[in-house]
């Protein structure tokens, strides 16, 4: 009963995470698009004299919309002013709850891989939380450094630092644990930008306008800058959110490098759309084929390389003994591993027929990526993985 409650609780939190995340990213994409499509009003016209910096007409949902953006603030603040912040806050809160439940309470399963680093649960959690907090501190200091004056150099330095963080975390965590913490670092940077830079800046603008004072334009410029950074983070973060379904990425020996490459693909795609929003689609179109070629080059490079197969037939009794010792503690009708009430993903490996039927999954997750057993809790050896691979290459016979 307790296990079922936790499953439903996780489902509820994950659903909240998706709902609020979609709302946040949707608003982010829309406002970046909006800002890049505003056109200045007629010079010395009444809108220009009223302080309007840009305007836009749109049609949607059966009606016409007129949007105006003031250079600083309107002559009078309207009674109803819409803010966009709670989507970001609840996305981060729900995400951190999921991180805590799955990767901190379940550290021995999802976060720690003893074949990578034999560390304690407390040490793993401290490293994880420290990397998230440290990521924001380093990023924020970079934004306050002279590097911010050159966005290209700033972006390259930030990308290099995140790649270095991915490499470092992959030396102490499981591949899946390293990926999710890079996502948590970027997600925390994004929400901290909202909480500590964007919203305070907007509050200062509103406060000054209500007092009849000229708002300091630095608040708006800084908020716009951080919003644009968030915009480029979104696609890499979305990839990390779905990456746990694709062990050939995080389970690769160079998973940290794959993450950097796939994130770069997302950044190139996002940059194309930003250029398109600025009316520069023709100049930016080359980014799409570059992203396409890069993605498939990554996929080719990550593909497992074939190894020689011994001529001597691998007996099924040897295979069955390995599977029963290393796998069936989880993959059984009634798992002996108390962390699972039912076999993960419904995969059972108790009979010869079940083992043969799952040969493709066994190859992908046990041999090609070494993501199973989870956290290598049962200490499957490299030699045992080779034996399973040879058996599959020889036809996976149960005779």
Image (spheres, grey):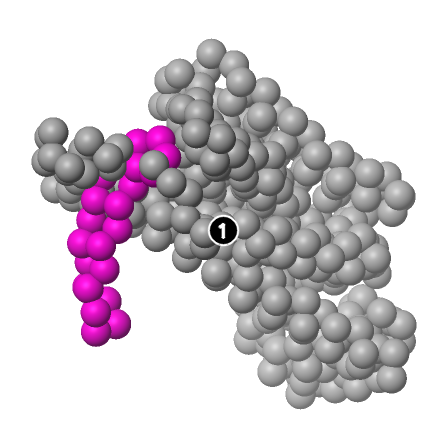
Residue at 47% across, 12% down: 146
Provide the residue span drawn in magenta: 53-74
Q: Residues within 10 Å of mark 1 (few under 14, many from 20)?
A: few
Q: Is residue 73 above or below residue 245?
A: above
- Of residues 306 and 286, which is closer to you in this image? 286
User: What percent of the width, then of the height, locates residue 265?
Assistant: 37, 44
Q: Is residue 259 magenta?
A: no
- Of residues 257 and 308, which is closer to you in this image? 257
Q: Which residue is mark 1?
A: 84
User: What percent of the width, then of the height, locates residue 154?
Assistant: 44, 22
Q: Specify the quadrant that holds the N terminus.
A: bottom right
User: What percent of the width, then of the height, locates residue 240?
Assistant: 54, 52
Residue at 60% across, 70% down: 15
Residue 154 shown left or right of residue 10 in the figure:
left
Residue at 75% across, 34% down: 130
Q: Is residue 58 magenta?
A: yes
Q: Secondary structure at mark 1?
A: loop
């Amino acid at each position: 009963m307790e296990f079922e409650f936790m499953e439903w609780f996780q489902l509820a939190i994950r659903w909240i995470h998706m709902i609020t995340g979609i709302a946040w990213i949707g608003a982010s994409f829309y406002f970046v698009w909006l800002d890049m499509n505003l056109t200045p009003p007629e010079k010395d016209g009444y809108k220009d004299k009223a302080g309007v910096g840009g305007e836009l007409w749109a049609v949607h949902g059966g009606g016409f919309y007129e949007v105006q953006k003031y250079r600083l603030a309107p002559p009078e603040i309207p009674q109803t002013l819409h803010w966009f912040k709670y989507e970001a806050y609840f996305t981060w809160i729900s995400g951190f709850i999921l991180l805590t439940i799955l990767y901190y309470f379940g550290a021995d399963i999802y976060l720690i891989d003893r074949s990578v680093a034999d560390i304690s649960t407390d040490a793993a959690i401290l490293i994880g939380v420290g990397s998230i907090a440290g990521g924001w501190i380093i990023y924020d200091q970079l934004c306050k450094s002279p590097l911010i004056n050159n966005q290209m150099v700033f972006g390259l330095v930030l990308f290099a630092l995140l790649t270095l963080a991915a490499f470092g975390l992959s030396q102490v965590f499981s591949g899946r644990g390293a990926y999710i913490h890079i996502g948590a670092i970027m997600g925390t940077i994004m929400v901290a930008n909202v909480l500590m830079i964007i919203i305070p800046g907007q509050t200062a603008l509103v406060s000054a306008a209500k007092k009849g004072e000229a708002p300091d334009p630095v608040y708006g410029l800084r908020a716009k800058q951080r919003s644009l950074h968030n915009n480029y983070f979104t696609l890499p973060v979305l990839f990390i959110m779905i990456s746990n379904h694709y062990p050939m990425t995080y389970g690769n020996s160079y998973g940290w490098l794959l993450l950097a490459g796939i994130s770069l693909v997302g950044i190139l795609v996002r940059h194309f759309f930003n250029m398109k929003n600025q009316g520069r689609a023709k100049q930016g179109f080359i980014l799409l084929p570059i992203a396409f070629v890069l993605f498939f080059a990554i996929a080719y490079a990550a593909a497992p390389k074939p190894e020689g197969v011994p001529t001597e037939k691998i007996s099924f009794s040897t295979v069955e003994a390995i599977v029963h010792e290393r796998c069936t503690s989880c993959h059984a009708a009634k798992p002996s591993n108390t962390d699972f009430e039912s076999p993960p993903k419904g995969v059972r490996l108790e009979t010869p027929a079940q083992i043969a039927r799952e040969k493709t999954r066994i190859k992908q997750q046990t041999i090609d990526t070494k993501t199973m057993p989870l956290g290598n809790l049962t200490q499957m050896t490299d030699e045992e993985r080779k034996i399973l691979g040879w058996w599959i290459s020889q036809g996976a016979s149960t005779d």
